[in-house]
């Protein structure tokens, strides 16, 4: 935790005083092309509603989530629950404790492939950063170790397209560098492949997949301490395109996808944890403000069950909080 705060604080201070002092932040291999760009923002047509649900048993932030057969799994994170693995059933509004994550860690990412949750990267007392990949099978309530990521990192994001998990961005604490690295994991062969780099290197970003396209949103980089950058990856062509930026610059946010729209929820800017809910429509490349959640926080995670986004955990007022958003 202390390592992550010190880096984020240094970046924030650099952003505040850069004009006066000329300070520079962690090297970034790719400049942020959309820093300061004005977002295309539509007025809300329907704000949606939030409801409070049963709290997560273990309060934590910078956790990862995945949904399998209508059950949301919350794994890892900080705040006393680094190895926690807890399952939420929306039908009964109840939580159940499951087999713990073998490698306790926070700032990890997760993806679901064929009913199995893959937990990738992160950092902990045993690895900073981690290249660890562990797979959870809810049918047997057990974990197995998989081939490690080629690039160890934390604060990365992940998305699944056509049966492969794409790990994007992150921070390499060993080399003190923000990454634009993209690597794809194929569970059928237990192998990783390097893909086209993300245009804007960043960490503490979020990702969502809409119609087979992976969208990387927000995060922190060298040229945008709190980014509103949105970039889209097409696995069919192994290429990236820049999209309309988020209205609010931020990192440490959560993303959920419902009916072809991506929802960017909460996060953090220079003033601290935020209450934000903005919807992106890839068909029109536009953003719309939606109803803010009940608890502003940074470092939450989200999962979608039956068209409802469940946001869990987070820092400053979050921790155990579970809230459901119906668009």
Image: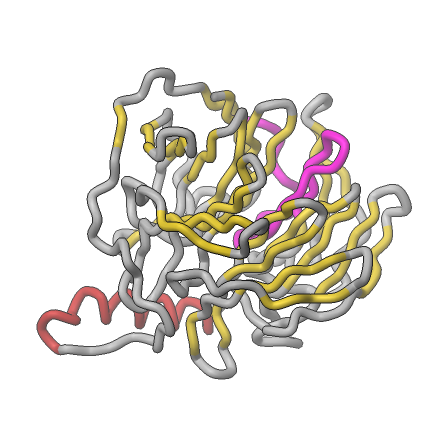
* Pick the front one: 4 or 248: 248
Q: Position of residue 181 (x, y in %)?
A: 51, 67
Q: How many marks?
A: 0
In the image, residue 153 above or below residue 227: below
Nearest to the observer: residue 51 or residue 320: 51
- For residue 184, what is the image quadrant? bottom right
307 and 274: which is toward the camera: 307
Colouring scheme applied when the structure was drawn: secondary structure
Q: Quadrant of residue 264?
A: top left
Whether residue 167 is in magenta: the answer is no
Nearer to me, 228 or 127: 228
Q: Is residue 155 visible?
A: no
**Residue 193 falls in image quadrant:** bottom right
Give the x, y percent position of residue 162.
68, 45
The residue drawn where x is 67% and y is 51% is 75
Does the magenta-highlighted stretch encompass residue 73? yes
271 relative to 212 in the view: left or right: left
In the displayed orientation, state which residue is furthest to the right.
Answer: 140
Evaluate whether residue 18 shows in this view.
yes
- Residue at image position (57%, 25%) is 308
Residue numbers of the magenta segment: 52-74
Q: Residue furthest bottom?
A: 175
Farthest residue, direction top? 46
Residue at (54% x, 28% y) in the render = 258
Vertical arrangement, residue 46 with respect to residue 249, above or below: above
In the image, farthest residue toward the left: 20
Q: Give percent across and percent down for residue 291.
A: 37, 25
């Amino acid at each position: 935790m202390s390592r992550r705060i010190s880096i984020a604080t240094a970046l924030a201070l650099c952003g505040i005083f850069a004009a006066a002092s000329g300070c520079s932040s962690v090297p970034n291999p790719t400049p942020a092309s959309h820093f300061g760009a004005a977002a295309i923002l539509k007025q809300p047509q329907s704000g949606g509603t939030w409801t409070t649900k049963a709290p997560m048993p273990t309060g934590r932030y910078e956790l990862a989530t995945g949904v399998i057969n209508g059950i949301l799994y919350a794994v890892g994170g900080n705040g006393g629950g680094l190895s926690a693995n807890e399952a939420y059933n929306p039908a009964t509004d109840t939580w159940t404790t499951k087999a713990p994550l073998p490698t306790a860690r926070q700032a990890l990412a997760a993806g679901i492939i064929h009913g199995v949750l893959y937990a990738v990267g992160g950092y902990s007392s045993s690895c900073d950063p981690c290249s660890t990949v562990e797979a959870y099978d809810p049918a047997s309530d057990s974990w197995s170790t998989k081939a490690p990521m080629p690039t160890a990192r934390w604060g990365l994001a992940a998305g699944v397209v056509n049966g492969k998990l794409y790990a994007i961005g992150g921070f390499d604490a060993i080399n003190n560098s923000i990454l634009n690295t993209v690597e794809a994991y194929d569970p059928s062969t237990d192998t990783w492949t390097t893909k086209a780099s993300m245009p804007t290197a960043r960490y503490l970003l979020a990702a969502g997949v809409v119609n087979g396209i992976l969208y990387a949103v927000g995060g922190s980089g060298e040229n945008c301490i709190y980014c509103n950058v949105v970039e889209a990856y097409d696995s069919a062509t192994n290429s990236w395109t820049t999209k309309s930026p988020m209205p609010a610059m931020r990192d440490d946010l959560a993303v959920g996808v419902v009916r072809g729209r991506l929802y960017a929820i909460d996060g953090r800017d220079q003033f601290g944890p935020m209450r934000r809910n903005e919807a992106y429509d890839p068909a029109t490349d536009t953003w719309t403000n939606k109803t803010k959640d009940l608890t502003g926080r940074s470092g939450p995670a989200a999962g979608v069950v039956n068209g409802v986004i469940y946001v869990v955990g987070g820092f400053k007022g979050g921790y155990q909080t579970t809230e459901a958003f119906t668009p």
